[in-house]
Image (cartoon, grey):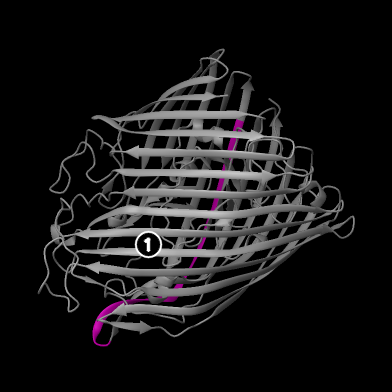
């Protein structure tokens, strides 16, 4: 198969003119949902002209990556980790930047949790994703506010044939038996002037098994990890109108529902444990996206959306999660919504200049309350075990966010582009409420604003090779949690908390040197200022913490990627990432940035010994990363691993494919976060049918 060169839409990549960017894409990628990062190669996650990567649906299928946190490890410069503690959240770091500094979008619509934005990336399923776009360091100002250190966008699929259907099923087994299953179904039609599609995924995991070498502790007896169960499903509906080759209008509905347990720290004493459970973790999004061509060299794109987030956290008194009868027990409920839109326009003002502008607006509303098992005074008088005794009044916070962006690309020569962009972001806080000590608290309303700038140079020295350099200075507004959360009485607010800021520098090269083959390399450096950290203080005679802008730091490293097709039947590839983070935290003794190894790699071999059969052994490797004990008193390094995985795939007929594989074949015991070991050996069998 002929290698696909990476192409770009201007303002995210200046390699093509605005008119060329309107040409469209005749595969299952929902191009209206892309951000300005890169168009993916079908088989590689090469580095693009701004240092970003993409992961295709086929890659996720080949390497059996059904959740977002597992998928991103296929890309250089990106690593997933466990949050630790009782939240049981899977994290993603891009060039060392975390979930607060790397926004997540679905089809270009930001998925944002207004209270704390503590996204759990394991809740997002990949079978219905055509590509995962990952921007690193350089995030186009046209894509809206945030993007301090990168951005992740999940692009859905759309139909390509008059009638098509697909179904997948996977069953997983661990050391002790059945773990769970994943099923996916899609039905769609693509007609001359319209398309329709419906799809859904369900993943039910009873739990996962620990390695056989795990030594039981007082909190975990081995075998299936206690409280590691999860249930996730999503539904996607899409209707589009394409009146001509240049215009497209689409309405999309996405509903995602999840529930999960939370394993306990394997060695912490009972009085340090939190017995938490999430009975629901739901996201819903309704959106309208459009692209309208204006003449031969201009366009207008619009997005309108309404999304909701409903979340419930239940806390218990006992490890069996059967008793709620103290101040430790509660039901914390969030009901959030966001609504807004954006408009982007671009034109080739001369043969040498392409200019683009964008405006974004979003309103976020967060409402929360607790259902307590003590009375309003905080004691058990008049209360009954496992019966809600006092329900807090609802507390609501409302905030508007705006962004105005402008970007110009100067086509200096046929092979040299120079990009410059700037944006002005501002945020207006309309309402901020809390309920503490039996009374409402109305926080002072404080607005924020920030100016961002970026620039890049791209030289395409041949038809297959390019060199780039870029710099981007971006900000990240603090969350409501960082500004106002009392954290169950352990913190005090800071309404004047300022944005974080990072200046990211990158230099890179990539080349497609043979059919289905590419090599790429980049280096990066990030200077981070005003990092937000939780600082211990004395407030009203009590020892509490407060979020403050007291941290500075710098991140640096390198990404490398290689895919080489030796012949039609044999291919090798992989990537290597190196990163070092240095952070100053004057108020936190012996502080170390956690969650990211200094060296991380994956490599694979794809061999087709006979027609229809493909064997894909692969390995994953990472060095140690910093973690801390539950109370933060000790930082130490853990988490190095060398995992051997394998998948075999056989195309039984052109419509039916069977596959089987294993992860962590040698059942390695390793821990990424203090007290939380990772899964042991896992086997799976799968089937895929297409029409």
Main secondary structure found in the magenta portion: strand
Please name the residue shown 25% across and 49% down the image: 263
Please name the residue shown 40% across and 29% down the image: 170
Q: Nearer the viewer, residue 301 or 569?
A: 301
Note whether residue 629 is visible. no
Determine whether 262 is above or below 451 in the image: above
Judge from the rendering whether residue 155 lies leftward or rightward of residue 599; answer left or right: right
Q: Give yes or no for residue 638 being in the magenta stretch.
A: no
Determine whether 588 is above or below 214 in the image: below
Judge from the rendering whether residue 395 lies leftward or rightward of residue 241; answer left or right: left
In terms of secondary structure, where does tag 1 sit? loop
Q: Position of residue 51 (x, y in %)?
A: 63, 50
Note whether residue 30 is visible. yes
Q: Give yes or no for residue 555 being in the magenta stretch.
A: yes
Q: Position of residue 554 (x, y in %)?
A: 51, 63
* Magenta span: 540-563
Please name the residue shown 54% across and 15% down the image: 653
Residue that numbered label 1 is attached to: 592
Judge from the rendering whether residue 539 lies leftward or rightward of residue 189; answer left or right: left
């Amino acid at each position: 198969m002929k290698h696909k060169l990476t192409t770009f839409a201007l303002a995210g990549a200046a390699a093509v003119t605005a008119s060329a960017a309107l040409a469209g894409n005749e595969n299952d990628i929902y191009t209206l949902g892309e951000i300005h990062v890169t168009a993916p190669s079908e088989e590689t996650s090469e580095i693009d002209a701004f240092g970003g990567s993409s992961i295709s649906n086929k890659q996720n299928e080949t390497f059996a990556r059904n959740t977002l946190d597992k998928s991103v490890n296929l890309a250089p410069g990106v690593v997933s980790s466990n949050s630790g503690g009782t939240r049981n959240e899977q994290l993603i770091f891009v060039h060392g930047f975390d979930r607060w500094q790397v926004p997540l979008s679905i089809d270009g619509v930001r998925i944002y949790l207004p209270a704390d934005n503590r996204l759990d990336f394991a809740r997002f399923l990949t079978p219905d994703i055509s590509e995962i776009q990952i921007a690193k360091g350089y995030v186009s100002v046209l894509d809206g506010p945030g993007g301090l250190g990168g951005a992740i966008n999940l692009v859905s699929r759309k139909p390509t044939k008059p009638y098509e259907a697909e179904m997948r099923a996977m069953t997983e087994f661990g050391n002790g038996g059945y773990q769970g299953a994943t099923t996916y179904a899609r039905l769609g039609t693509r007609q001359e002037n319209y398309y329709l599609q419906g799809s859904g995924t369900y993943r039910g995991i009873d739990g996962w098994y620990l390695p056989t070498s795990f030594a039981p502790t007082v909190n975990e007896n081995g075998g299936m990890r206690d409280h590691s169960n999860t249930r996730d499903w999503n539904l996607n509906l899409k209707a589009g109108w394409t009146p001509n080759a240049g215009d497209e209008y689409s309405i999309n509905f996405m509903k995602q529902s999840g529930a999960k347990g939370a394993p306990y720290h394997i060695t912490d004493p009972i009085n340090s444990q939190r017995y938490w459970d999430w009975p629901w973790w739901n996201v819903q999004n309704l959106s309208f996206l459009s692209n309208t061509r204006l003449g031969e060299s201009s366009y207008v794109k619009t997005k309108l959306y309404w999304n909701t987030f409903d979340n419930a956290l239940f806390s218990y008194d006992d490890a069996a999660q059967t008793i709620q009868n103290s101040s430790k027990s509660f039901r914390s409920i969030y009901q959030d919504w966001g609504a807004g839109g954006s408009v982007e326009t671009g034109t080739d003002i001369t043969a040498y200049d392409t200019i683009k502008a964008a405006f974004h607006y979003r309103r976020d509303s967060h409402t929360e309350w607790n259902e307590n098992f003590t009375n309003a005074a905080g004691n058990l008088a008049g209360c009954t075990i496992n019966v809600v005794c006092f329900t807090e009044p609802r507390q609501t916070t409302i905030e508007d966010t705006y962004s105005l962006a402008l970007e110009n690309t100067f086509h200096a020569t046929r092979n040299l582009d120079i990009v410059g962009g700037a944006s002005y972001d501002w945020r207006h806080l309309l309402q901020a409420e809390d309920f503490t000590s039996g009374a409402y608290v109305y926080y002072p309303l404080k607005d924020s604003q920030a100016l961002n700038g970026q620039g890049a140079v791209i030289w395409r020295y041949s038809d297959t090779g390019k060199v780039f350099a870029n710099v981007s200075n971006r900000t990240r507004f603090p969350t409501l949690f960082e500004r106002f959360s009392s954290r169950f009485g352990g913190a005090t607010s800071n309404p004047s908390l300022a944005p974080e800021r990072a200046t990211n520098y990158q230099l890179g090269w990539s080349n497609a040197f043979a059919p289905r083959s590419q090599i790429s390399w980049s280096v990066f450096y990030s200077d981070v200022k005003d990092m937000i950290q939780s600082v211990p203080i004395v407030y009203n005679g009590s020892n509490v913490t407060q979020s403050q802008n007291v941290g500075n730091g710098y991140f640096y490293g390198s990404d490398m990627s290689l895919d080489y097709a030796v012949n039609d039947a044999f291919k090798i590839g992989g990537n290597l990432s190196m990163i070092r983070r240095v952070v100053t935290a004057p108020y936190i003794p012996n502080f170390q940035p956690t969650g990211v190894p200094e060296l991380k790699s994956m490599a694979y071999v794809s061999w087709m010994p006979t027609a229809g059969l493909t064997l894909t052994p692969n390995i994953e490797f990472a060095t140690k990363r910093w973690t801390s004990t539950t109370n933060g008193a000790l930082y130490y390094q853990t988490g190095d691993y060398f995992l051997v995985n394998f998948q075999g795939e056989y195309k039984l007929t052109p419509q039916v494919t069977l596959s089987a594989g294993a992860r962590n074949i040698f059942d390695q015991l390793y821990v990424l976060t203090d007290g939380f070991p990772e899964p042991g050996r896992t086997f799976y069998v799968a089937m895929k049918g297409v029409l």
